[in-house]
Image (cartoon, helix red, strand yellow):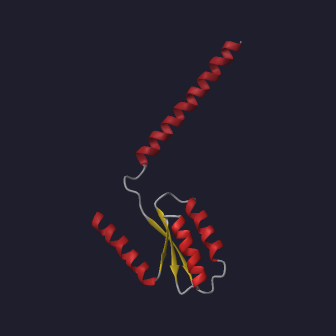
Amino acid sequence: MLQSFFWVAAALLAAIGAVHVVCALTAAALEPRERTRSLLVIPLDPRVENVEQVIRHARFVLGQRPSGCRLVLLDLGMEEEAREICRRFCREAPELLLEDEEGFLRLLQSQKGGAAEKK
């Protein structure tokens, strides 16, 4: 009786393992060859009072997305104290970028140019 239970449990575990292997192989086969880069843009102007909380929430949202996503903090004339908070976060996390309007347009042009070159 105990031996039968052991064989049933072993067969069940083997079946579960086989399903996991098939799922892993399928996921690897269906994964795109090139990672797409996406930008999450947070516009920050003087009306935004809680910059640190906004950035922390955006980083949480960014953590829920596939890798390759960057967070752009768009400076639309925010105060110096808020700008310093943004700089501190950017030093700590390489996926964060602090850009003004001109820098953001250059970033978009470089992204567009990179996509055009790949086609």
Asked whether residue 68 appears in the rendered view, the answer is yes
User: What residue is drawn where x is 71% and y is 14%?
Assistant: 2
Residue 17 in which image quadrant: top right
| Rendered view: 17 above or below 72 | above
Q: Position of residue 85 (x, y in %)?
A: 59, 75
Q: In the displayed structure, does residue 78 sit left or right of residue 50? A: left
User: Relative to the observer, which residue lies in front, 91 or 41?
Assistant: 91
User: What residue is drawn where x is 50% and y is 57%?
Assistant: 66
User: What residue is drawn where x is 32% and y is 68%?
Assistant: 114
Asked whether residue 119 appears in the rendered view, the answer is no
Residue furthest right as drawn: 1
User: Relative to the observer, which residue lies in front, 91 or 108?
Assistant: 91
Q: Position of residue 112 (x, y in %)?
A: 35, 72
- The quadrant of the picture occupied by the C terminus is bottom left
Q: Position of residue 103 (x, y in %)?
A: 42, 80
Residue 44 in which image quadrant: bottom right
User: Relative to the observer, which residue lies in front, 12 or 92?
Assistant: 92
User: What residue is drawn where x is 66% and y is 82%?
Assistant: 49
- The quadrant of the picture occupied by the N terminus is top right
User: Relative to the observer, which residue lies in front, 84 or 14?
Assistant: 84
